Image (cartoon, rainbow, N blue to C red):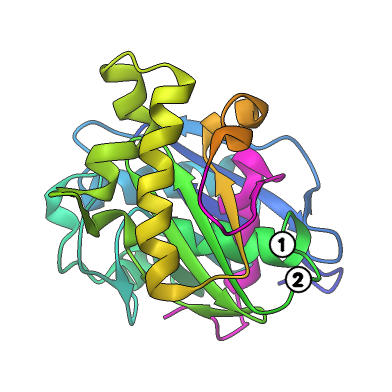
Amino acid sequence: MSARGHAFGIDIGGSGVKGAVVDLATGTLTHDRIKIATPQPSTPDAVAGAVAELVAQAQWDGPVGLTLPCVVLDGHARTAANVDHGWIGTDARSLFAKALDGREVTVLNDADAAGLAEDSYGAARDLTGLTLLLTFGTGIGSALMYNGTLVPNSELGHLVVTGAEAEHLAAASVKDREELTYPQWAERVSTVLGHIEDLFWPSVIVAGGGISRDHDQWIPLLTNRTPVIPAVLKNTAGIVGAAMAIDSGIAP
């Protein structure tokens, strides 16, 4: 973190590695984000090289926070969603630190990072109780926060609902692949949310992912009891959450 209250966050996804300097007072980016295509195959070494290239382009010389589409425990990736399965078991923190010449790095799950950002600067700011962020994309990512404290690696997209994993039933990619209308898809989302809210009883559910841009076409159609509100940070949430994780002690 810089003396000016800035930090650098990088959000690693299946298609892009995106990063920027974040003003931690406001949760905004200080400049346009830099994006590099995720290497294919997205092996740990290849992605670490892309991260080093991005940080060099940004001319950033301080600590770096990074997200992965993986369960992350003590800096190690334990699963791999939409990235090469070679990530499983990888000491991601050491890998990125080596790629960045030994500087301090923090690594956490991508949905957890987005949830932290929305809770601090976005849709869930100033709300109390249990907040659940769900990101609807290729799969369904989740982040659970209680009064601003993260419960990491919740992975609720893998809950079995009516005989299938939740994300196989109601991810945004399923809507596209099966050519579902918004009413048809919203019915599936309601079914998933109903199972989740019966287990956790959240105060509010924040809906993220690219499809949240069209929230007016499907959130009003949901029939579950918990209020659902659209995320507001959109494609910067992962970057902001990654930057927040630096020196904060919130990364698992």
Q: Is residue 230 above or below residue 106?
A: above
Q: Which residue is mark 2?
A: 127
On the question of residue 61 being in view, the answer is no
Residue drawn 81% across the image and 47% down it: 30
Q: Which mark is residue 124?
A: 1
Report whether 192 appears left or right of 1.
left
Which residue type carries mark 2?
A: Leu
Q: Quadrant of the N terminus?
A: bottom right
Mark 1 surroundings: few (<14), some (14-19) or many (≥20) residues within 10 A: many
Q: Is residue 231 left or right of residue 154?
A: right
In the figure, is residue 229 to the left or right of 65? right
Label 1: which secondary element: loop
Q: Is residue 243 magenta?
A: yes
Foreground pick, 18 / 127: 127
Can you say whether 231 is above or below 7 in the image? above
**Foreground residue among 240 and 232:** 232
* Image coords of residue 139 (percent x, y): 32, 42
Residue 136 found in image quarter? top left
The answer for how far apart the CA atoms under marks 2 and 1 are is 5 Å
Mark 2: few/some/many CA within 10 Å (<14, 14-19, 20+): some
Labelled pair 2, 1 in contact (Cβ < 8 Å): yes
Image vertical order of residue 41 relative to residue 141, above or below: above
- Using the image as rendered, state which of residue 120 and residue 105 is in the foreground: 120
Q: Magenta span has 150?
A: no
Q: Residue at x 44, y 72 (%)?
A: 102
Q: Secondary structure at mark 2?
A: loop
**Magenta residues, start to end:** 223-252
Give the residue at x 51% y 51%. Answer: 224
Which x, y percent locates residue 39? 29, 33
**Residue 130, horizontal then vertical, whole percent:** 59, 76
Residue 140 image position (x, y, % from top left): 37, 47
Instruction: Tell which of 116 and 126 is nearer to you.
Output: 126
